[in-house]
Image (spheres, grey):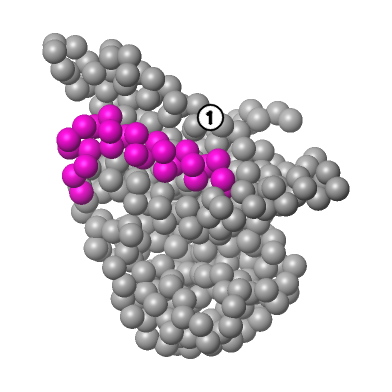
Amino acid sequence: MDFRLDEEQLGLQDTVRRLCADRFAPERIAEREGQPIDRAAWRALAELGVFGLLAREEDGGLGLGVVEGAIVFEQLGAHLVSGPALWSTLAAPCIAGAASGDRLVGGVEQLGSNDEPVVVEHAGEIDSLLVLRADGVFACAGSELPTARTLAPLDPLTPVGRFDALPRGTRVGDADDASQLRLVGTVLCAAMLLGVSDAALASSRRYALAREQFGVPIGSFQAVQHMLADMYVRTALARSATYAAAAVIDDPGIGDPLGAGAAAKLLAGEAALENARAAIQVHGGIGFTWEMLPSYLLKRAWVLEHTFGDADSHAYSISSSIEAALA
């Protein structure tokens, strides 16, 4: 399998990177804390086609593949973009206005009863809610949703609210559609975790080159070099697994999409969490402060780690797949 990106994909990557650097600059990240979603920035992402990546052209989308989605969402993860970008992208093929950015679409997996409480990101701001259930995909308009109770979030850039129960909503997809959206969501979430991992590495490298101790950059110390090397290896492994999983979804004939997706989420989650922790350590005393980038990266990694399955669930999925193959 050729993992090299072509010129169009590299151009897409660079364009999204430049937009995110302008609208979601890391040096201004503390200004976004506790603030509502920047609708101008959201509109800019929509105009670039971010939310319509996977939607068909006749539905107002770009009709691209999951590989292009992974390229884009890696950049969204690296810049800690605010808002339900992942769910809006998944919802674009079935909820009008999601691709264009006219509607903020949140989402949740609800594998149990409708009467069970659920926690939804950006619950107070979304215009629609996409619900993935065992029997299909459902859309709930904002007017149908009950009042959400605001909860304290893990990530200060990702507010959450609790719904005690959800309406049934309008069925917009069957069980197979729900399974496919879970799979695509898993890989795009892995891409965001990959972005977090890469951002932690880049932040640590910059600091290690600039911060001096005993008259030399701390990056010259072997202990710091070893930490940075480990961060690089984790990021490279996660990138290979994530891009491979995206390619397998686009062409299932080359591998097992479910296994590839589980491996990508498992490795990308580990890379993001471990690299964010390492970034805090490289930054030393200031790395533990609330307003520093490594702190935000770690908190976002915690949130994404529990989106579309955590490490334990994906490790179990992989082990079950291997056991079945050996039986």
Relative to 296, residue 125 above or below: below
- Report helix, strand or loop for mark 1: helix
Q: Is residue 303 above or below residue 296?
A: below
Q: Evaluate whether residue 61 shows in this view.
A: no
Q: In x, y percent, where is residue 311? A: 54, 50
- Is 174 situated above or below 261? below
Horizontal placement of 106 versus 249: left or right? left
Q: Confirm whether the magenta stretch covers residue 274.
A: yes
Q: Position of residue 20 (x, y in %)?
A: 38, 45
- Viewer-proximal residue, 96 or 295? 295
Residue at image location 44% in from the left, 41% down from the top: 272
Question: Magenta span covers which residues?
Answer: 265-290
In the rendered structure, the answer to whether residue 28 lies left or right of residue 103 reads left
* Residue beneath the point at 43% across and 22% down: 229
* Position above or below: 181 against 22: below
Mark 1 highlights which residue? 236
